[in-house]
Structure formats: C-alpha cells, structure tokens
Image (cartoon, rainbow, N blue to C red):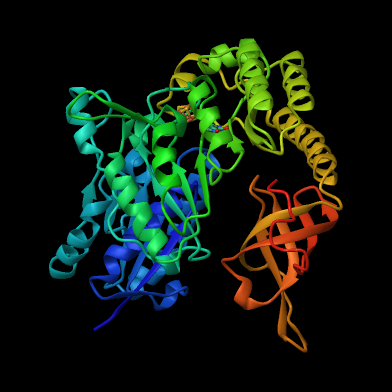
Amino acid sequence: MTKLLYIETVGCQMNLLDSELVVASLRKQGYELTDTPGRADTILFNTCSVRQHAEDKIYSALGRLKNAKQRHPEKIIGVLGCMAQKDQRKIFERAPFVDLVVGPGQLHQIPRLLEEIAVERGPRLEVSLDRQAGRRDEIERSFESYDPDRDPEMRPTPYQAFVRIQIGCDKFCTYCIVPSVRGPEQGRDPAHIRAEARKLADEGCREITLLGQTVNSYRFRHGDGRVTRLSDLLAGLQEIPGLARLKFVTNYPKDMTDDLLAAVRELPKVSPYLHVPAQSGSNGVLRRMKRGYTVEDYREMFGRIRERVPGYAVTSDFIVGFCGETEEDFEQTVELVRECRFKNSFIFKYSERPGTKGAELFADDVPEETKRRRNNELLAIQNAISEEENQQFLGQTVEVLVEGPSKNSHRHYEEEGPILQLTGRTHCDRIVVFEGNRRQIGELLPVTIYDTAPHTLFGEVVTCEVGPQVYSLS
Ligand code: 5AD
Ligand code: SF4
C-alpha cells in the first residue's frame, strides 16, 4: 500500500538538496508525496538552526500537530537536519509526540528507522558525534555525505539541480552554529561528483549548482597524494555534454584563489556569478566574528574579481547588530556596500546561537530596535544599487536559461498557441521575466531587455533573423 509523505523544508540550499534525497529514498519504500499534512502518514520537518527565528517556526509547527497526533497516534512525526543535531533529546522533551530525530549526517538511516517504527513504536534518535567528542577521523565518519538517488519532482524544475561537493565547515566564525551541526569540512570524491553530474545531464538537467558551506575551500586528496581543487573540478564538469551552466555557492573570501578566478573566466559554462559573503565592513566586527580577513583583504579580493572576470556579478551576506557593533562600524558596512555595488545582498539581524563562541565570549548588546533599523537602512541602500545596476541591461540582449512559468503567470492564447509569462536567469544569475510558450522551458534563449526592477529584468525573446550568434553572453 502506498504511504503518504509530507515534508517541509526550511533553511539553505543544502537542506533543499537533503530533502530531495530523503524523498528519493523513501519513494523506493513506496511513499508518495502529499502537500496536505492532514492526509500524510508520515510528516517530516527538515530544519535550520542558523537563526533563532527558524527554530521557533519549527517548534510552533510541531505544537500545532499535537492534537492531530492524539487523534491519529499512527502518524509518524520526524524532525531532521540542523535543529535535530543541535537539540537532540531536547526535541522529545519539548514535543514528546515526535517519533524521530535525525541529524544531517545521519539521513541515510531514515528508511530503516521508519520501517522499525512501523513494527515497534518508541522514539528514535540518530545524530552525529559532537565536535569535541573524539578524534577528528571518528567525528568525520559520523557525518556521512548523503547523495544517493535524485528526485526531479522535488526540484523547482528538472533543468536545474544542486550537487553537493563538500559537507561541514572548519571556519568556526563566532556567530555560526554550522560547524557544530554539520560537522568537519570534508570534500567529496571528484569521481562521484562527476558521475552524479553526468547522470543529471543525461536526464535533461542543464544547470548544476555545486554546494558547500565554503565551496571554494574544496579540496580532495587522492590516494596517490594528488589534490583536486574546485578549479580542477569545474574544468572536468565543463566537458559534460548537455550541461549549459555551472554555478557554485557559498564562497569564503580568503579562499578566492587566482586559479579559481581563471577557471570562472576561461570556462564558458561557469557562470561569472560569485556569492562571497563579507558579513561586515568593520575590522573590529570582523575580528570578533573571527572571519579571518580584514575589510582591506575583502577589497583586494573584490578587485581581483573586477579585473579578471568579465561580466561578473557578486552577491554578499551581511549580519547587522553583531555584538559590540557601533554606529561607526555600521557606517563602514554601508561604505563597503556602496563601494562594491553588489548585485544583491542578504541582510540578517544577529541572532545569538547557544553553543557558539560568540554566545560564550560577547554580550548580544545591540538593541533589537537598532538591529531592525540598520537592517532596513542597509537593505534600502542595496536595493537602490541593485536597481541602478540592472538598468545597464536596458536594450541589451542576454542569454536566458528558461526555468518555467513565472509566479504570477497568466495564460492567453495567440495564433501559435498558449502564451505564458516565463521566468529564467542570465549567466550572471539575474532573473528575467518574458512571454513565451511551454516548449521553451529548459532552453537557452536570447532575450532583449525593455524594463528593469531592483531584482528583475523584463524582456522579449529575440526571433532570430540574423542567426543565433547575435547576442552577448552577459
Ligand atoms: N545570526 C544572524 N545571521 C547569521 N548567519 C549565520 N549565523 C547567523 C547568526 N547567528 C548568516 C550569515 C551567513 C548566512 C547564511 O546566515 O550571514 O552567511
Ligand atoms: Fe558559518 Fe563561517 Fe562556516 Fe559560513 S564559513 S558556515 S558563516 S562558520
């Protein structure tokens, strides 16, 4: 009999990928997806711990299931991912009706655990070792990269996929919980990465985004001592037929090496889009964050991107209101944003994470109101920059990988069939909205831009009269 699975995912791209893999493995056990939790036999939450807010949302969603579980005790409720690794048994204490808690390094156990629970009830907990709990190799082994079969239905489009190349993080920025919940940094074998990318390309995937917490720190040491770097990996993936685009996130500023920038410039499939979080523009704050670079180092790195990567688009993350951040520190962040003119920035209010060095060493002393004001101010400045930067595309023709109907797509009919509002992205990761038809989804199309907004370009597909090579590759 088919069993119905409901899965809710919060957090980063790693979590989206993990959920896809969990669903693929459970389909083999006869599960089918439902988007109605009320109908599901099994309800899973794939969770995030990076900010308090993300955890609060999960605990209140769990709270809302309490009655349903009383009425239907046979329903299985599971908590997966970073919050499972961080809170472990505490989840059973706060929500005693939860059946299953599984950390991100133990997801491969889920099919077996669900089978066991079906036979005999009782809470199951599978987490990896704490980072202080033993030798590095033991801890590494307790975090398993989980990359078996894929499930294209879980992806927004079958033409785009994430491929994990690295798990964990060794940077230990003082505000960040990731190194404790996702374990030590480990690069995946390039042969496995290439095989997975080839399989995805054979299934029709056009764009692959390589994932790692510090993706450009990727290194794999082979048995004979040879080392594969991210630039080497990209060169190998460039050769896979069918793939049109390669991206990689998230970059760590100190590891933006010249060989990688050369690969981005030289390899035509590699997008000139680089997400390199600066986090702050103040040296005092960067030091307390233990980011391992100064704002001068960041500027130097940005300068190299500007010089070496034509058509580059850089995006950043910023945390406002980190411990001890003064108005002057914040002004320095504003200055960096104005100077770098990022394509986009993700801005977060500092959220203290118990168990991090930041929580241990520094007081969370910036008032919430100040955090909110700085967040809004920085966002307004960034939005104005994004809008101005987008205006340079007016009248230009860009190459768009078509992803699917846009969110507000409405159909109308013309002679050649139903016309939809479609969305896709340029090589430098800018969103483009235009009219087209369903057959164009998954194709690379030349689109001429006639209007712009801070985060969107609006265009019209070029009907090729001169030949297909008339458009620029930005
Ligand atoms: N509080 C607020 N933002 C955080 N981030 C990571 N940890 C925290 C925290 N404790 C942000 C960083 C990171 C992004 C994924 O989340 O900017 O780059
Ligand atoms: Fe967290 Fe810093 Fe690692 Fe990024 S590099 S995951 S911010 S510890």
Q: Please say if 413 is above or below 284.
A: below
* Spot occupied by residue 473 in the image (x, y as percentages of width and height): 68, 48
Asked whether, in this view, residue 359 is left or right of residue 280, the answer is left
Q: Please say if 272 is above or below 304.
A: below
Q: Quadrant of residue 132?
A: top left
Q: Is there any visible trace of residue 95 in the rendered image?
A: no
Asked whether, in this view, residue 439 is left or right of residue 226, the answer is right
* Spot occupied by residue 109 in the image (x, y as percentages of width and height): 21, 54
Residue drawn at x 80%, y 59% is: 448
Near-viewer residue (97 or 176): 176
Near-viewer residue (414 or 380): 414
Q: Please say if 309 is above or below 64.
A: above
Residue drawn at x 31%, y 40% is: 190
Near-viewer residue (123 or 292): 292
Residue drawn at x 39%, y 38% is: 233
Residue drawn at x 27%, y 44% is: 191
Quadrant position of the N terminus in the picture: bottom left
Q: How many marks?
A: 0
Q: Is there any visible trace of residue 80 in the rendered image?
A: yes
Asked whether, in this view, residue 297 is left or right of residue 146, the answer is right
